[in-house]
Amino acid sequence: MTRGQARANGLARLRASDDPSPALAADLLLADACGIAKEVLYAHLDEALPPDREARYRELIERRAAGEPVAYLRGWKEFFGLRFAVDDRVLIPRPETETLVEAALAYLRAGRRRRVADVGTGSGAIAVAIAVNEPEARVIATELSSGALEVARANIARAGLAKVAEVRLGRAADTLRQLLVEGAGPFDLIFIDADKPGYPEYLELSLKVCRPGTVIVADNVVRQGEIVHASSADANVQAVRRFHEMVAAEPRLSATVIQTVGVKGYDGLTIALVISD
Ligand SMILES: C[S@@+](CC[C@H](N)C(=O)[O-])C[C@H]1O[C@@H](n2cnc3c(N)ncnc32)[C@H](O)[C@@H]1O
């Protein structure tokens, strides 16, 4: 069987499984099964596919057809031009978060600011993308899950950032309190992307480790528009509503909420600037 024939079979299988992007998935998985880049694959579709690689490709296609994300099947995801190891212990970094990293880098550079806290780091994508692109940055990330922590630490080590980016295991609120005790702040940029019920507490603690000029960013705050429903029974929605009430009532903050439309549908970011002590 040629690579092209295997590709046609894989594509047909994924189409039948209602894959949202069957052609891309079929090509990426075939390229991985062949151990080559997708672009090289396109140039050599008439080459024979050895039986072991064909078997591997079939297995990947079946797992994809059963719903496994392509990034988990490949074991990595590109984010901000960098390769991140990912598996089912972490969420897959989203393309729309790249815009956030771009804005964060511009902000850090413009004000010669460097201290970053990443609350709920997952794969470490934000922490690593910032530290790679802003050598002056110093990032402290928090993570509750030991599996995710391992992934984030591996990504940090692979990028050669062990001296400038650190991940601490534990509840984010405990870690933020510990950072306060250590005098590790003030932070110039604080990303909040851990459990939503914790958002009000993370805001309270962030306000203790900031200074005028600090930017606090909270992700996933629109929740498909659900946050307009005051009577929502969803604990995440209620916590994010409380978070916004606190932001609105806090005289030290000037804030805005930006709705985003991305791979997860309608969501958004709160961006709050600390304007006074
Ligand atoms: C949405 S993911 C983070 C994604 C990451 N910021 C990105 O953009 O790729 C949230 C992470 O927060 C972690 N988390 C959940 N509750 C936490 C808590 N109480 N303290 C610290 N981390 C927590 C989860 O384990 C998960 O890895």
Image (cartoon, grey):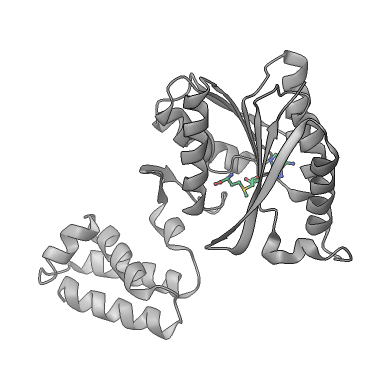
Residue closer to the observer: 246 or 275: 275
Q: Is residue 196 visible?
A: yes
Indicate left or right for 76 with 29 as reference.
right
Q: Residue at (50%, 53%) from the top-left corner?
A: 96
Give percent across and percent down for residue 273: 68, 34
Give percent across and percent down for residue 238: 84, 56
Location of the N terminus by quadrant is bottom left
Location of the C terminus by quadrant is top right
Q: Residue at (28%, 61%) from the top-left corner?
A: 33
Quarter holding ligand 1: top right
Indicate left or right for 227 with 194 as reference.
right
Indicate left or right for 71 with 277 as reference.
left
Residue reaching furthest top? 183
The relative height of residue 208 versus residue 259 in the rendered view (above or below) is above
Q: Is residue 124 visible?
A: no
Give percent across and percent down for residue 89: 57, 49
Q: Residue at (24%, 60%) from the top-left corner?
A: 38
Q: Quadrant of residue 61?
A: bottom left
Residue closer to the observer: 61 or 206: 206
The relative height of residue 206 versus residue 238 in the rendered view (above or below) is above
Q: Residue at (52%, 31%) from the top-left corner?
A: 107
The relative height of residue 83 versus residue 160 in the rendered view (above or below) is below
